[in-house]
Image: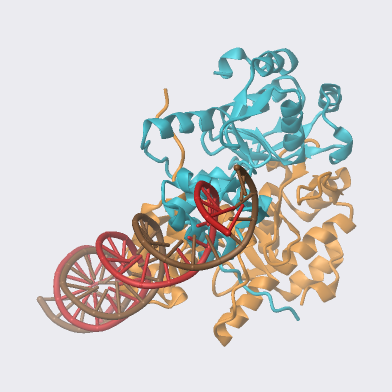
Chain colours: A cyan, B orange, C red, D brown
Amino acid sequence: MDARTETDVAQVAAAIGDPSRAKVLLALGGGGALPASALAAEAGVSNSTISGHLAKLLDARLLTVELDGRHRYYRLATKDVARALEQLALIARPLPVRSLNADTRAKALLRARLCYDHLAGRLGVAVMSALQEQDVLAAEPAGTGDGDAVYVLTPHGRAELTAFGVDMERLPRRRSSVRYCVDWAERRHHLAGPLGAALTARMFALEWLRHGKYRRVVHLTAAGREGLAATFGVPADQLG
Amino acid sequence: MDARTETDVAQVAAAIGDPSRAKVLLALGGGGALPASALAAEAGVSNSTISGHLAKLLDARLLTVELDGRHRYYRLATKDVARALEQLALIARPLPVRSLNADTRAKALLRARLCYDHLAGRLGVAVMSALQEQDVLAAEPAGTGDGDAVYVLTPHGRAELTAFGVDMERLPRRRSSVRYCVDWAERRHHLAGPLGAALTARMFALEWLRHGKYRRVVHLTAAGREGLAATFGVPADQLG
DNA sequence: AGCACGCTTCGGCAGACAGCGAAACGTTCT
DNA sequence: AGAACGTTTCGCTGTCTGCCGAAGCGTGCT
């Protein structure tokens, strides 16, 4: 027999459910690692305060630390943590803007951000929709209509992406279907899963994308703007 | 321009992050509706206390109410709330057993439960795995190996399920792929999405499954035990 | 060795909040 | 109308916890 039983949802949720801690987690939501002092600045609290918070997040196994000299780099413990955060963002209310700085940050996040390892935000949904236009992905609308649509990669799409330089060998074979997230800001789908991660990685390799000051924020380069229009037919007016 | 900005993850998480409130949400996780007093018993607090909690959960838009005479039936506001809860359960630590009663409840939940509209728990993963054995579903192992596998419904499987009485017309057409959840207890996949919901509904219609005292708990009937073995080849020793 | 730096620990304070019982409110049943 | 019932509101108490500054500890620079 097995000692496992119900899990302590309340404890994790409480760990996430503090404004400072949530800011920390969101700042790390792009999959990057940051030292304690940067996280303190991010959350707008003192170093001693953030230290307590980080200890709590470690205890809840939401974060891991890497020791590097006198620095300590924190990152999300697993992909599942990032997924849980995005899922929570989906059911959360919009947050009123606090400062001018926060406003530009927020706008940048809405424009293009990483959802741990794949592209999200307006850019993410624009790419997803362009991939359908180009018959790279085929949508199969949900029967029940409640956000449970399904996408598959077409043979043509497979060829297209291979030509683009995505290493398709390392992805699920045959009639692949495709994972996606419901974007919390756009309420539309963006590409996720292994394919989303691989495509995003390729775009970074081509320098179509660059990391912003914080890893979660992504900037589209001029090359990226041209490339997306030329290769996938993403309309330029959706790249603002 | 759009006033939407970052969302308030902290607020939702805080709403979930109280033991009593989490118990309420989990009790409603099967998609059912319960009156305030039942939820108070469920959480083990007084009626006045639960009333405050329910008000908070309503304010956070995690629940909705239906007024029915002097009763008020609460249920989860959307499927997304249920999804968020399961995602949190996935990253939460196991909870130590408190009472004998809680223990039998927990065991029942591990055996078979509803994940809002589809089957989960040991029974859920057993069915999922049997469906693969029977070539109803084909698994396409993840390239990156981090839980991003993909399943598709085979033509044979489509015929099989149609014969079983699942209304396949109302589901995504053509080369459908299939949504799944990672079961928080088993750490294996169970069938979700429209197909999972439809199959589960059919099993209820056939009286293979019956609701327990609380809707989230599901009981397998004798007919269900036989049917699952005969129709899908689910081994009897996995139905304990 | 000595200093600067990043981070954590400690002590203390103030606000938030879960808990209960009593009372109020509205609905249903007799 | 009156009693029973489900639910919410109110007042109160105790506890928890987020916050800071100061002090402590280990690491790296010079």
Residue ID at (85%, 49%): B139
Residue ID at (70%, 72%): B111
Answer with left or right where residue B114 lies relative to residue B140. Answer: left
Answer with left or right where residue A199 lies relative to residue A190. Answer: right
Residue ID at (53%, 58%): A54
Percent position (x, y) of residue A128? 67, 28
The image quadrant where one finds the N terminus of chain A is bottom right
Between residues C21 and B136, which one lies in front from this camera angle?
A: C21
The image quadrant where one finds the C terminus of chain A is top right
Q: Quadrant of residue B188?
A: bottom right
Between residues B50 and B235, which one lies in front from this camera angle?
A: B50
Q: Quadrant of residue B134?
A: bottom right
Answer with left or right where residue B97 lies relative to residue A230. Answer: left
Percent position (x, y) of residue B17? 47, 62
Percent position (x, y) of residue D11? 16, 72
Percent position (x, y) of residue A139? 71, 31
Above or below: residue B109 compared with residue A201: below
Between residues A1 and B176, which one lies in front from this camera angle?
A: A1
Query: How many numbered tags mark residues here?
Result: 0
Please indicate, yes or no, whether residue A126 appears anywhere in the rendered image: yes
